[in-house]
Image: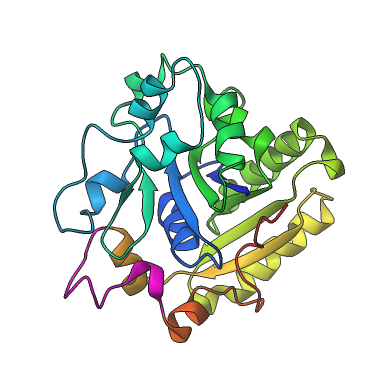
Amino acid sequence: MGLLAIASAKGSPGVTTSAMLFAALWPRPSILIECDPSGGDVALRMPGADGEPLDANSGLLNLVAAGRKSLYPDLVGQHAEQIVGGLDVLTGMTTPEQATGLGQWSQLGALFAELPGVDAVADLGRIGAETPQNALLAAATAVVLVVDTVPSNVVHLRDRVRKVSDSLGGEAGAPIHVVVVAPAKRARAVAEIRDVIAQSQTPVAEVHHLAHDPKGAAFFLGQVSGSPARDRVGAFGPADRRRARGTDGGRVPVSPGR
C-alpha cells in the first residue's frame, strides 16, 4: 500500500518512539520496520505479545538472507513479530557492522512500499549525505523528519529537508512533513519553527507539533506495566488518539495512500 519514512537530521529527537506511535495509531493495517543501520531498539525495549523476548533469528537481516535471490512480500510476514500491545514489527539490525554488507536498500524500499493490504512505517534513524538507508526515500509515499526545538537541530533539519526534496524531484516527489517533538506548552516555539521554515522557503508540506508525553512515551520505551490486555498499543481509545494529534489539530502525519 504505502511507505511512510521517518527520520531525523541531527540529535536524538525520538524517531523510534515516534515511529512506533504512528504505526500503533495508524488508521489502516500497518507494520513498523526498523531500517536504522546504527542498530534497532525495538527488540531491546519491547517483549513479544506473549511476554517473551523477541526472536533473535527473525527481523530485517534474516529477511534479506532469505530473499537473497528474490525479495517478495510474503517474506515480510514470515520475519515480522508482534510486540506486546499488538503491533507488528520487523526488527532491525543489532549492530552497525551488520549493515555494512546490506546492499539491497533500494529493493527493500520497493518491497515495503508495495505490501498488499498493509502500510509500512519505516524508522530510518538519522539520515545524512551518504547514509545507506537514504535509498528507501525514493520509494516513500511520504517522508517525516522529526526534530526538537534546539535551534541548531532545526537548522540542520532545514538543510537536510532541502537535500531530501532535491533527491526526490522537488514538488513532484513525495511530500515531506516535519514533526516537532516538544511539550504541549511549547506551542509558541513550534509556531516559530513553522514560521522560520516557511520564510526560508524550505519545501515542507506541513509542520506538526507532537506533544511530548513522558507517560505515554514510557510504553514505547519498554516501560510496560500492568496487563498487556490493558496496554493495547494497537487499540488505543479516543483519548489516546487525541493525545497523539498535533496541536494543529491534524493527525501526525497524513496517511500515505496511493
Q: Position of residue 254 (x, y in %)?
A: 66, 62
Q: Nearer the viewer, residue 167 or 12?
A: 167
Answer above or below: position of 29 versus 161: below
Identity of the residue furthest to the bottom in this view:
239
The location of residue 147, given as percent across then percent down, is: 55, 53
Magenta span: chief secondary structure = loop
Which residue is located at x 44 percent, y 18 percent? 102
Q: Is residue 51 magenta?
A: no
- Residue 36 in the image, given as x and y percentages of width and height: 44, 35
The residue sitting at 50% across, 16% down in the picture is 103
Query: Is residue 228 located in the magenta-colored stretch of the structure?
Result: yes
User: What segment carries the magenta color?
Assistant: 222-236
Up the image or down, 230 lies above or below 99; here it is below
Q: x, y percentage for residue 61?
A: 36, 27
Residue 35 in view in this figure: no
Q: Is 41 above or below relative to 210?
A: above
Q: In this rendering, does residue 135 appear at all?
A: yes
